[in-house]
Amino acid sequence: MGRVKQTQAIEVRIGECECPDTPHAETGDRAFLRPRLTPEGGMAASYVLAQMQKGDGLVDYMRTMGMVLLEDGLIRWDVQDDDGEPAPTDRMSLRSGMYDYDETLKPIVDRCFELYEETVLHPLEAMVESQKKRPASTSSNGGLTRQSTSAPTQPSAAPPGP
């Protein structure tokens, strides 16, 4: 296969149709994802991985990476608002709390992690393995903490002798 890849959306079933008048009763509510990250999404994922290497914790990584994947991967869905209009999928709407995470967004995010695991999870696994091989750290999370941004202190110069 060449460098130019065909793009066919991947369907993710969210659950039973909850739209007014249940227009998707047979298929349920569905989301449609890109089969691979866009260049912008790939770069954002790489940035999150780099931050993790610098010491951000796993919780920060999962939260940030999940939003990167959701925002970049979600092309559209057939979810409707209370007026029967398409529910927005823009960044602000996804981050606003207007959608229930467990019932609506989690199935999409989980599928994103599966689809983009080469970009997202494999580097994380390698990072965790390299952390295991390091000498024991005094931190409680295997060395995955934020590093200090303070400038290292220099020993003061000895006063000139007589």
Image (cartoon, rainbow, N blue to C red):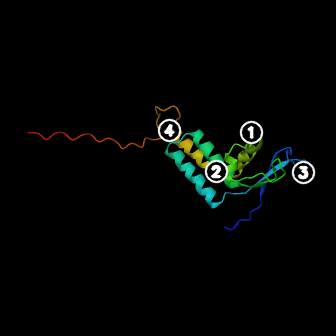
Q: Residue 107, position in %: x, y?
A: 75, 44
Question: In the image, which is nearer the foreground, mark 2 or mark 3?
Answer: 3
Disc 4 marks a residue whose amino acid type is: Thr
CA neighbours of label 1 inside 10 A, class few (<14), some (14 to 19), many (20+): few
Residue bearing the label numbered 3: 23
Question: Which residue is at 46% across, 36% downward?
Answer: 135
The C terminus - image quarter: top left
Q: CA distance from mark 2 to mark 1?
A: 17 Å
Question: In the image, which is nearer the foreground, mark 4 or mark 1?
Answer: 1
Disc 2 marks a residue whose amino acid type is: Val
Q: CA distance from mark 2 to mark 3?
A: 30 Å
- Residue nearer the viewer, 92 or 29: 92
The N terminus - image quarter: bottom right
Relative placement, left or right, of 8 versus 135 is right
Residue bearing the label numbered 1: 102
Q: Residue 145, position in %: x, y?
A: 50, 38
Disc 1 marks a residue whose amino acid type is: Asp
- The image shows residue 153, relative to residue 86, as above or below, that is above
Say which element carries label 2. Answer: helix
Q: CA distance from mark 3 to mark 1?
A: 22 Å
Say which element carries label 3. Answer: loop
CA neighbours of label 2 inside 10 A, class few (<14), some (14 to 19), many (20+): many
Q: Say which quarter of the image contains residue 38.
A: bottom right
Residue bearing the label numbered 4: 145
Question: In the image, which is nearer the foreground, mark 2 or mark 4?
Answer: 2
